[in-house]
Image: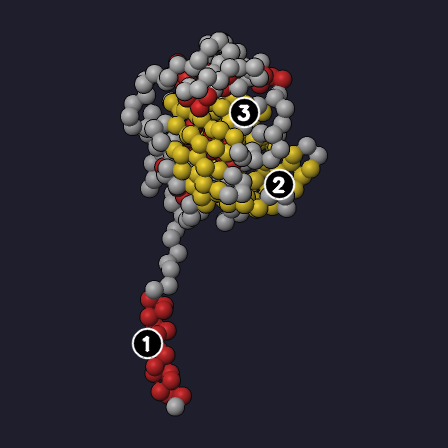
Amino acid sequence: MRVRAFLFLAPLVALGCAHAPEMVPAPSWDIARASTTDTFRIAGQADNFGVRVTQTEMLGLYPDFAIAREGNEFRGRALGEPVVLGFHDGQGAGVYRGFPFSVYAQRTAVGLHVTGNFGGSLSNFELTRDRLVGRVGVCGWDLRWDGEAYTGSRGCGTNIQPVSVLLPASMVGWSDEEVGAALGLLMNVGHRPAMDRIADNSAEFRNGPVPDPALSYYYGLGRASLSPTVARPVGTRQGMVPGGGPVSAPVNTMPASRARPAPMTR
C-alpha cells in the first residue's frame, strides 16, 4: 500500500517542483543595487512599509501614494496632497506636500549625487552600489549594502533608529533625476516640517531666474505654493497659480522621448 501511495505521489511532487518559482537575479545597475521585485521598501522600528513602483506609477496605501510617471513628469497624490514634478536634463522641479520641490542629479565616479529642496527641506545625499548616505528631508541616513538591502541607521533630530531600504528593480531604467526625486518622495514621508529658512528664500521660487527654462512651468507651481493667499481660479492646471498670476501651460521644449537616456542595463 505504501509503495502504491509513493508511486501516486511521486509524479505530483515532480510536477510541483517543475512549476516552483525561479529566483530571478537582480538587474545590473551602475549607480546602485536593486532587488528582484517592483517594491520600494523601508523596514525599521518607526516605519515598515512598501510602495509598488512600476515603469508608469508609484502606488501605496500606507503611506498614501498614487503618482503617475509619464512624459518627463510625475503627477498625482502623495500623503493626501498633490504632486506635480517635471524633469529635464538632470533636473526636476514642481510642488510636493504644499511646498516647492527641486532636484539636481549628478553622476560621480561611484554613483549619483542628489541635491535639492524636497518639499521645503534642503537635501543632499549620495547613492552608490555600496552606500545610501546623506540628508533626505529632515532626516539623515547612513546605509550600506549588506548583500540584500541598504542597511544602517536613520536619524531624525535626536531620534536615531536602525533601518533598511530596498530599491525596486523597476527604477533601473529611470533617468537619474527621476531616481533622485522618487527617493526624495519615498524617503521623506514623516511629519511635514516648517519651511527651511534657506529653502524659503530660494531665488528660483521667488520670481528669480530658473536654472532650466524648460522647467519654468514647474518652478511656477512651486512658487505658487509659497503664497497662502493665492487665488485659485477654476480651470487652471491643478488649481495652483503663482502670486504674479496664472501659471502658463508648460512650453513643449522637451522631446517626446526621455530627456536623458535611461541608465543602461546589462
- Distance (Cα) linking label 3 and label 2: 28 Å
Q: Residue furthest bottom?
A: 1
Query: On the rendered image, what quadrant is the C terminus found in?
Result: top left
- Place residue 20 in its image quadrant: bottom left
Residue type (three-letter) at the residue carrying disc 2: Ser
Disc 1 residue type (three-letter): Pro
> Quick one: which residue is furthest to the right in this view?
158
Viewport quadrant of the N terminus: bottom left
Q: Which residue is mark 2?
A: 153
Neighbours of disc 3 within 10 Å: few (<14), some (14-19), many (20+): some
User: Can residue 106 be seen from the camera position used here?
Assistant: no
Please, is residue 123 above or below residue 7 in the view?
above
| Left or right position of 135 against 112 | right
Q: Secondary structure at mark 2?
A: strand
Query: What is the CA distance from the residue labelled 1 to the residue labelled 2?
Result: 49 Å
Q: Position of residue 82 (x, y in %)?
A: 49, 29
Amino acid type of the residue that numbered disc 3 sits on in the rendered structure: Gly
Q: Residue at x 51, y 36 (%)?
A: 186
Residue with the mark numbered 3: 98
Comparing marks 3 and 1, which lies closer to the viewer?
Answer: 3
- Residue 190 falls left or right of residue 26: right
Dot 1 alpha-carbon crowd within 10 angstroms: few under 14, some 14 to 19, many 20 or more: few
Give the foreground label among 3 and 2: 3
Q: Contact, CB < 8 Å: mark 1 with mark 2? A: no
Q: Position of residue 15 (x, y in %)?
A: 33, 70
Distance of mark 3 from mark 1, alpha carbons? 60 Å
Q: Residue at x 38, y 60 (%)?
A: 21
Q: Indicate the quadrant where residue 216 lies.
A: top left
What number is the disc on residue 11? 1
Tell which circle, 3 or 2, labels the residue nearer the N-terminal end: 3
Above or below, 207 relative to 36? above
Q: Secondary structure at mark 3?
A: loop
